Image (cartoon, helix red, strand yellow):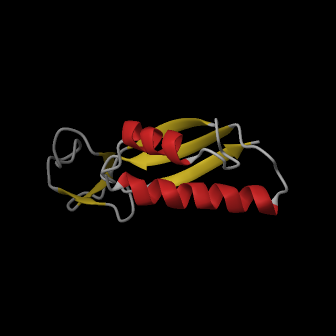
Amino acid sequence: MHELPAVEDLIGTLDETAREKEISGIKEINIVIGELSSYVGECVQMYFDLLSEGHACEGAVLNFRHTKARFKCEKCGHEFDHGRDFFCPECGSMGRLVEGTGKEFMIESIVY
């Protein structure tokens, strides 16, 4: 249910963008969702379908691109995608989350 306020903000941003660019309708929205963001594409879609009625984005297609969290090995510095565990595939040492990765929820692009 935490997707609801995020979708409300998303629709507000889309309305503002449509006003600024003097666009009457939006056809597609490409959204990035990080694996650690806790947002679920199906829930985002459900709220979008319910709330977008009467807005510039009504009827638009949502496309989701899911991103992985990135880790950096504490020992050798190798960066790697989060897999089944947090250990470096190069040396086996523990990796640390790279700041800002895997937590994304953002508009990547809009098709008018």
Q: Where is residue 54 in the image (x, y as percent from the top left)?
A: 66, 47
Find the residue positioned furthest to the right: 22
- Return the residue nearer the eye: 86 or 44: 44
Q: Position of residue 41 (x, y in %)?
A: 40, 39
Q: In this view, does 81 lie to the left or right of 95?
A: right
Q: Is residue 11 left or right of residue 33?
A: right
- Return the residue nearer the eye: 31 or 101: 31
Q: Is residue 102 visible?
A: no
Q: Is residue 97 visible?
A: yes
Q: In this view, does 33 lie to the left or right of 2?
A: right
In what quadrant of the picture does the C terminus appear?
Answer: top right
Is 53 above or below relative to 98? above
Hey, which quadrant is residue 15 in on the image?
bottom right
Residue drawn at x 14%, y 47% is: 92
Hey, which quadrant is residue 66 in on the image?
top left
Hey, which quadrant is residue 10 in on the image?
bottom right
Residue drawn at x 43%, y 39% is: 46
Q: Position of residue 51 (x, y in %)?
A: 53, 48
- Return the residue nearer the eye: 18 or 66: 18
Is 53 above or below relative to 95? above
Callout count = 0
- Return the residue nearer the eye: 88 or 7: 7
Residue drawn at x 71%, y 48% is: 56
Q: In this view, does 93 lie to the left or right of 71?
A: left
Is 38 above or below relative to 40? below
Q: Where is residue 35 in the image (x, y as percent from the top left)?
A: 33, 46
